[in-house]
Amino acid sequence: MKICRFDDNRLGVLDGDDVLDVSTVLEQLPACRYPLPRHDLLVAELQRLAPAIEAAKPHARRIPVNTVRLLSPVANPGKIVAAPVNYTKHLQEVLGDANLHHDNQINHIERAGLFLKAVSSLEGMSRGVELCHPERRSDPELELVAVIGRTCKNASAADALGYVAGYCVGLDMTIRGPEERSFRKSPDTYCVLGPCLVTADELPDAGALDMTLHVNGEIRQRANSRDLILGVPQLIALASSFYTLHPGDLIYTGTAEGVAAIKAGDRMLAHIDRIGTLDVRILEQAQ
Ligand code: MN
């Protein structure tokens, strides 16, 4: 299934060029009281609710997808884990350009480990990216994103895919500069996710997906997830060896070569085969 969230927090299933509105299923989510759980409620219940979602589809309102506002398919991730340089060609690109590395120590991912983006930076594709410090350079990074479906700690790479709820297309927006990664990658709207969550039963192997990023019609990045240095299973093993992963946690798997600046007015099309396309505008700085 291709699960999406749209308009005023409605739940949808993508079906071709339409969204089927299955929001009635949300009434089956457990009620929460303070303190709220650390996981995303919908992702935690997704497997249990899948039959109800299927049952709601034949009666669902059908809406053309290009007439709705697509939100982040995961509403409340507990954390956004991200991989730094995780494609060999991108590592070489960063090492060769002082505007990219800014004398920061750039390490192979096995030495650098992972980093976190603020959950407040997360938006769906229809919101647009609002430039932060527009006098500085901001870049888009196209990334395959795995969504954790079950709580895990110290998962082995061999077992890791069993903890995945599904996959999305992500843009890890980045201000270039000397500061810590998490600071430069966490402004509001600097983490785009969508257009849907493709459930893992529909995409059992995300290890060989073609992906492209176009900006204003020009190709900027072209990659395949088979070229990841650490694939999804290895990233989950590494992340869960440091912290418990909860349903809804996001794993941004890292970007390929071809990073370049964007400016207000630009339009980004971020595509991953078998998942979909993010269509995102770059907006002026927020007031
Ligand atoms: Mn990245």
Image (cartoon, rainbow, N blue to C red):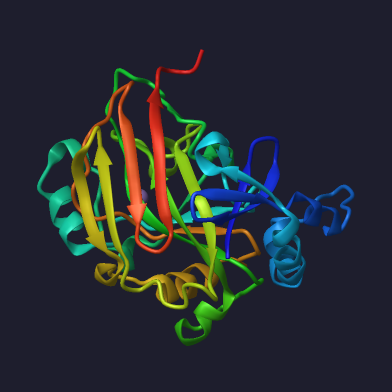
Of 232 and 195, the residue lying toward us = 195
Of 52 and 73, the residue lying toward us = 52
Residue at horizontal 74%, vertical 65%? 45
Regarding residue 35, the answer to whether it shows in the image is yes
Tell me which corner region of the image, top left, top right, bottom left or bottom right, holds residue 97.
top left
Query: From the viewer's perspective, is residue 6 above or below residue 111?
Result: above
Tell me which corner region of the image, top left, top right, bottom left or bottom right, holds residue 272.
bottom left
Residue at horizontal 89%, vertical 49%? 33
Query: From the viewer's perspective, is residue 6 above or below residue 107?
Result: above
In the displayed structure, does residue 71 sit left or right of residue 210?
right
How many marks the image carries: the answer is: 0
Q: Residue furthest bottom?
A: 158
**Residue 57 picture location, percent across and down:** 70, 60
Tell me which corner region of the image, top left, top right, bottom left or bottom right, holds residue 261.
top left
Query: From the viewer's perspective, is residue 211 above or below residue 9?
Result: below
Residue at horizontal 35%, vertical 61%? 273
**Residue 209 picture location, percent across and down:** 32, 67
In the displayed structure, does residue 16 sit left or right of residue 213?
right
Residue at horizontal 16%, vertical 59%? 89
**Residue 14 picture location, percent across and down:** 56, 55
Q: Quadrant of the N terminus?
A: bottom right
**Residue 191 picture location, percent across and down:** 47, 42
Of 9 and 33, the residue lying toward us = 9
Query: From the viewer's perspective, is residue 144 above or below residue 201?
Result: above
Q: Residue furthest left?
A: 96
Regarding residue 38, the answer to whether it shows in the image is no
